[in-house]
């Protein structure tokens, strides 16, 4: 697989400079929370989702490559992963995220498996 899981796919409708903070986030099988922070860094783009109250007090780091589409009108982000896949992902660790390439590798590897077809 040559696709970079840390980059937005062209079909998402994500535009550079778009502020995604506060957008609601939908897994392929239901709502999981809202965007707490995001980055558009080249080859390191991501969203951090606050999953409360779905998973009480947990934040998850999602590589931009799991975003199926962005709907700026409804302020929603749709993912191509299930709630279970996200719940079982490596836990978000702010300290590791800020400077540990091994942590990004771990998260990237978890999400790099083949994806189902994006929702339209």
Image: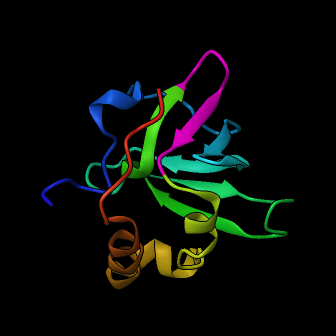
**Within the image, what quadrant is residue 11 found in?**
top left
Vertical comparison of 17 with 89: above or below: above
| Residue at position x 23%, y 55% in the image | 4
* Position of residue 23 in the picture relative to residue 98 (left or right): right
| Residue at position x 64%, y 70% in the image | 87
* Position of residue 49 in the picture relative to residue 4 (left or right): right
- Residue 110: x percent and y percent? 40, 74
Query: In this orientation, which residue lies closer to the viewer: 2 or 99?
Result: 2
**Within the image, what quadrant is residue 58 found in?**
bottom right
- Residue 107: x percent and y percent? 42, 73
* Position of residue 76 in the picture relative to residue 33 (left or right): left
| Residue at position x 87%, y 59% in the image | 53
- Residue 51: x percent and y percent? 74, 59
Q: Which residues are magenta?
A: 71-80
| Residue at position x 33%, y 74% in the image | 109
Q: Outermost residue, top direction? A: 73
Vertical comparison of 26 with 58: above or below: above
- Residue 105: x percent and y percent? 32, 77
């Amino acid at each position: 697989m040559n696709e970079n899981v840390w980059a937005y796919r062209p079909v998402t409708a994500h535009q550079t400079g778009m502020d995604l903070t506060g957008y609601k986030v939908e897994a392929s099988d239901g709502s999981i929370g809202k965007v707490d922070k995001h980055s558009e860094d080249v080859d390191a783009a991501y969203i951090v989702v606050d999953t409360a109250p779905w998973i009480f007090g947990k934040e998850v780091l999602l590589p931009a490559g799991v975003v199926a589409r962005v709907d700026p009108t409804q302020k929603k982000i749709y993912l191509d992963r299930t709630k279970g896949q996200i719940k079982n992902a490596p836990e978000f660790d702010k300290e590791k995220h800020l400077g540990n390439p091994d942590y990004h590798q771990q998260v990237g590897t978890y999400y790099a498996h083949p994806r189902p077809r994006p929702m339209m």
